[in-house]
Image (cartoon, grey):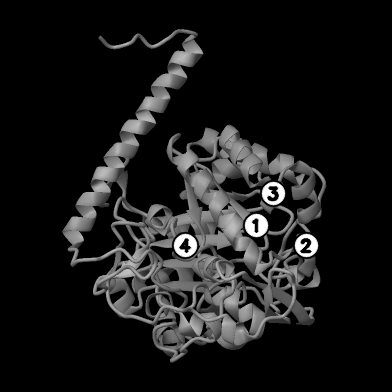
Amino acid sequence: MSIAQVNGERQATPQRLRTVQDRRLHVPVHVVWEITLACNLKCGHCGSRAGKRRANELSTAECIDVVRQLAAAGTREITLIGGEAYLRRDWLEIAAEIARLGILCSVQTGARGLTKERIAAAYAAGVRAIGVSVDGLRDLHDSLRGVSGSHDQAIRAIENIRAVGIEPGVNTQINALSMPQLPQIFDEIVAAGARSWQVQLTVAMGNAVDNAALLLQPHQIIEVVDCLARLYHKGRDIGFRLLPGNSIGYFGRHEPHWRSLTSNIEHWTGCNAGETTLGLEADGTIKSCPSLPKSHYSAGGTRSTPIEDALRNLESRTVRRDGNRGRSFCGSCYYWNTCQGGCTWVSHVLESKRGDNPYCYYRATTLAKRGLRERIVKVAEAPDQPFAVGRFEVRLERADGSRAPRSLGLDDKRRKRGRLVLCRSCDEYIYAAERACPHCGAAHGPETAADETFRREIQTSIDEVERHGRRILEIAGMAGGDIPARE
């Protein structure tokens, strides 16, 4: 496994890091697999409406065959989900086969009933990453998850996972109720021993459509991202990693800091659904992404369609090949040719098609400078089915809430193509061919990739010195003494 330098420490390159060749060959690098829809929670925001197992879930033998097909296709990580994955009796057998074939096996869980014994058995089977859902402080989490005591069980699971020898992660859905609690959630999960925190938006699918008051309004993404960026830097100082999910972003002043999985400075490059990511349902349905509805994004089922054929079936539906030119602000956006409208899931669930994503940091901040904001309004309910979507209208408003014409809600910077680099003045991404930064107006000469890397290495070194300085002050404070002045 290759090694990268992160904050001066040697770290293994993440399994789900995509290469140019992965994208060109459509290698399913990361597969998220719902192995059962059975669940012991009653989440008011659950997109899959989990609860009861599907009537025709794959057999153990069929699951083992799927694992072997994925290994042959080049998959490097499989995340087992549900429902609740460990409610399936043969989940450890499936996990063991994944690990035996050299694929990283991870699990995402609500953790109700995830005992020490189950965690130890998972580790013995080869599970090496477990993410626990924590969606708020105790009262809010229990309310969202529909079961009293589920919060305490989740926190206890984090502690037990770490005790077994796995570095625990946490996942949090951000909605109108959890947004104000993000700093407190950060402190709570760090204290419990979590080492990473993936955050994503509660998206308008399934139960969340029924409870639409939970959904963030698009203009609130500014407050959310600014808060998360502060927590990202706070976490970095203590060796804790905040990971923005595919629904969080995009571009703006925070983008250079938190998107990369390695020490390289990277940015959002578009949705990977069906390209290097696959989703599987418990009945064998193969989808571009685990969150997307199969009505639009299914490539068949594993009982009749080999994984290799399914990947070919999905090629024309990836963001780089589906011909979508974007709508509204996204259709006019400076970053469209790189971003392609952000997360397909977020945009599709609103209007049953992708290409117009109002939950975009760059979009929201650009509109805010003009005194404009966007709001979503539900106009149709979702059917009572897993992964069902309703219909929402995206409205452009002035600050006083009055409607504004859509013509005012377009980007004022022309679409461009090419390689993105950082502006030397404002640290926002711009296209390398620009003579002047479209964001701050500063003159921009040609900058090589080596120039950018060197500049970021200097900044990383400065950050590291500052981090150690703060740590020295903390140690001195705990010791009750003063740091002697240098002569």
Nearer to me, 40 or 7: 7
Percent position of residue 441, x then y: 34, 66
Residue named by callout 4: 78
Q: Which amino acid does label 1 sit on?
A: Ile
Q: How far apart are marks 4 and 3 (CA)?
A: 33 Å
Considering only order in the chain, which callout, 3 or 1, is on the residue closer to the N terminus? 1
Q: Distance between the residues labelled 1 and 4?
A: 24 Å
Mark nearer the viewer, 4 or 3: 3
Instruction: Tell me the number on the disc at residue 44.
Output: 2
Q: Distance between the residues labelled 1 and 3?
A: 9 Å
Image height of 233 relative to 328, above or below: above
Within 10 angstroms of label 3, few (less than 14), some, or many (20 or more) residues?
some
Q: What residue type is labelled 4?
A: Ile
Q: Which amino acid does label 2 sit on?
A: Gly
Percent position of residue 374, x then y: 65, 73
Residue named by callout 1: 174
Instruction: Tell me the number on the disc at residue 180.
Output: 3
Which structural element holds mark 2?
loop
Which structural element holds mark 3?
helix
Q: Which residue is drawn at 54% across and 87% down?
A: 327
Considering only order in the chain, which callout, 1 or 2, is on the residue closer to the N terminus? 2
Percent position of residue 396, x then y: 66, 78
Q: Distance between the residues labelled 2 and 1?
A: 13 Å
